[in-house]
Amino acid sequence: MLYNFSPKKKFLTWRKLWLYLAEIQKELGLNISNEQILDLKNHLHDIDWDRVFFYEKKFRHDVMAHLYAFGEKATIARPIIHLGVTSAFLGDNTDIILIRDGLEILLKKLINVIFRLRNFTLEYHNIPTLAFTHYQAAQLTTVGKRSALWLQSLLLDLEELEFRLKNIHFRGVKGTVGSADTFKELFNGNLQKVKDLEKKLSSKFRFKNVFPITGQTYDRKVDAQILNLLSNISQSSHKFSNDLRLLQNLKEMEEPFEKEQIGSSAMAYKRNPIRSERIASLAKYVISLSNSSALVAATQWLERTLDDSANRRLVIGQSFLSIDSILMIWNNILENIVVYPKIIDKHIKEELPFLMTEYLIIKCVKKGADRQDIHERIRVHSMETNDNIKLKGMENDFIKRILHDKKIPIDEKEMNQILNPKNFTGFSSDQALEFIDKKVNPILNRFHHLIESDISNMDRQI
């Protein structure tokens, strides 16, 4: 991703646009020689950065600086470089190419996060755990069902990413204000040749779609759509990082912590969740940048204004780089994430006596007891137990109270059967497995070629 948004790739792409433009113009009958085309090819990678700097300082214009520097190398081709086009031809088409290539890089890393979350969900699909609403213990779910929620958010993001990739449009050759006036002159009014030029050029860069209408630039709403997608991925990743940090506080799950890793310079015992915090920090940044691209799209003037330029040079590349980092960190966490089933079970046992009260009422009613009487007995025991726990620090003795209450027709054997946590997870396990089978596996099968079994093969440093 660093290379994708590097000056080297950007300006090499400019030169490729100049080369392919000239090749196709020649093919369509313009007076361009084979020697000129060969001259462009021979000097395609020969960028003299000192001369570029010299000309940019002189002209205060980046395109003209590169055009002059290229022309000093490709002297034979110099007269036909940039023929009929404006700066937006280079800038906008290049930006679209970099955005497309950036999305393809993110696609691979997103698929790998989905792959690892799929494996985690399968491994823990049947392990009961406390579910929380308002961060208060609610009913039970399973560890795998919860991770399926993270997965579902990512599938929504993946669907949008695929849509953007499928429907991304090349800016094409539209002239100075989008009217293709110069090409009308170059091709003697032949509109079909202009269309052929656009089609052939877009095909050179693997684009199936070309904007039929533009001003000087492509619609900046495209940038807003792309950054909104990146914001959505940030939202999903931030949600995961929040959940993991809450669970790490409960000691139920934990991100990887290296043998010699230091959690705090002062508190030697600490195991701070630095990876999750880094995800959250970057995600907030990307979410904030998405608003910037929306403001740019909303405030463009007529065929174009240049107050978009500096903004876009910052927010597009930085958003992609941030999401790239987020997905690498997320993959790193999932590769060695730790689950503590005994702590999870301990927390279930602390809360289960209260969670199973409705189940208990139904059992008693089946034996002929009065529903309202049983409800009242259980309510009284629940309140007294809560008071003892919170005010006196006592153990939860709710079950003992129920067993010793002769007005509640439940014996110890029945109580032990009731207290099996799997009685209270509903269809969590089935839902997780069906979700994996019907929704996740088909996607992973389709993108199996992108899956890295070992994330150390990814271009990253955590």
Image (tube, rainbow, N blue to C red):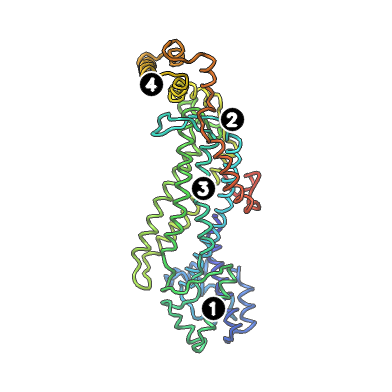
Please state which amino acid type lies under the numbered disc 1: Ile
Residue that mark 1 sits on: 81
Residue 375's label in the rendered image is 4
Residue 17 in percent (x, y) is at 55, 72
- Residue neighbourhood size for the residue with mark 1, other residues' Cα within 10 Å, grouped as few (<14), some (14–19), many (≥20): many
* Cα distance in 3D space between marks 1 and 3: 45 Å
The residue nearer to you, when weighing 319 against 206, is: 206
The type of residue carrying mark 3 is Leu
Give x and y (percent) for residue 452. Answer: 64, 47
Which element type, helix, strand or loop, lies under badge 3?
helix
Give the image location of residue 255, x and y in percent.
53, 35
Residue, disc 3: 154
Look at the numbered disc 2 and give the secondary structure of its residue. Answer: loop
First along the sequence among labels 4 and 3? 3
Q: Are marks 4 and 1 in contact (CB under 8 Å)?
A: no
Measured along the vertical axis of the image, is residue 359 above or below residue 57?
A: above
Task: Give whichever of discs 1 and 2 has the lower sequence position.
Answer: 1
Query: With respect to residue 163, does 200 lie above or below?
Result: below
> Residue flagged by tag 4: what amino acid is it?
His
Q: Earlier in the sequence, mark 4 or mark 1?
A: 1
**For the residues carrying marks 4 and 2, which lies nearer the camera in this image?**
4
Q: Nearer the viewer, mark 1 or mark 2?
A: 2
Q: CA–CA distance between discs 4 and 2?
A: 51 Å
Mark 4 or 3, closer to the camera? 4
Q: Verify CB contact (< 8 Å) between mark 1 and mark 3.
A: no
Residues packed near mark 3 inside 10 Å, few (<14), some (14 to 19) or many (20 plus): many
Q: Which marked residue is nearer to the observer: mark 1 or mark 3? A: 3
Q: CA distance from mark 2 to mark 3?
A: 31 Å
Name the foreground residue: 52 vs 407. 407
Q: Earlier in the sequence, mark 1 or mark 3?
A: 1
Mark 1–mark 2 distance (CA, rounded to whole Å)? 58 Å
User: Residue 259 shows which numbered tag?
Assistant: 2
